[in-house]
Amino acid sequence: MGAPLKQTLQSLGWVALIGMAVGLIGPTARAGARGSEKLPEIRLCVKKDVCLTVEVAATDAARQRGLMFRTHLPADRGMLFVFDTEDFWPFWMKNTRIALDMIWIASDKTVAFILEDVPPCKADPCPTYAPLRRARYVLEVPAGSVRKWKLSVGQPVTFEWPPKNPDSSRVPGPGKVRERKALSRAFGL
């Protein structure tokens, strides 16, 4: 084999190797970007006159990301983590930059357990926080919300998940109207 041909094949080998690496890394990068996609939002009321807009984390990827890297959470916002079954779902604050109140909610949509003012994790290993009662949902809201609302175990919480009528055109929310079609597309309803 001549020197130019050998050199060309070696160069092609590097190109192929780089191409394979990009091919393997590309889907991973896109999957990571999907984890930061906008989550569906619903209206959730902790009391008759206290309602907020919550993002719904109903997939493993969304639940794993949670509120990581957020530097602010407005008082009328939160995140609802949805699980298929009731259990003692533990949470941690890894890469969470803000203090939160955590509210575990049973399948009957009553408050099962509350932890207030859970601090961000400053160093590994991060502590885990688990309820003393089983829950199917966990609501994370800005620290101090539970105290402000005077929320307690046993109180009902109202929300619709999954939406009963995903084809209806709009979901009312505080200050904004959300498209239900986005929910049906996101969760195949």
Image (cartoon, rainbow, N blue to C red):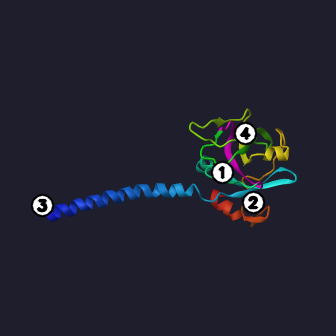
First reached walking from the N terminus: tag 4 or tag 1: 1
Q: Which callout, 2 or 3, points to the residue nearer the camera?
A: 3
At mark 4, the secondary structure is strand
Q: Judge whether residue 83 is colored magenta.
A: yes
Q: Which callout, 4 or 2, points to the residue nearer the camera?
A: 4
**Amino acid tagged 2:** Asn
For label 1, the residue is 57
> Residue shown at 34%/58% (left/top)?
18
For label 4, the residue is 135
Q: Position of residue 96 (x, y in %)?
A: 63, 47
Residue range (magenta): 75-90
Residue projecting furthest to the left:
2
Q: Main secondary structure of the magenta part?
A: strand
The CA span between labels 4 and 2 is: 25 Å
Of the pair 7 and 72, the residue shown nearer to us: 72
Would residue 167 be visible to someone looking at this image? Answer: no
The CA span between labels 1 and 2 is: 19 Å
For label 2, the residue is 165
Q: Is residue 170 above or below residue 124?
A: below
At mark 3, the secondary structure is loop
First reached walking from the N terminus: tag 2 or tag 3: 3
> Residue shown at 83%/47% (left/top)?
148
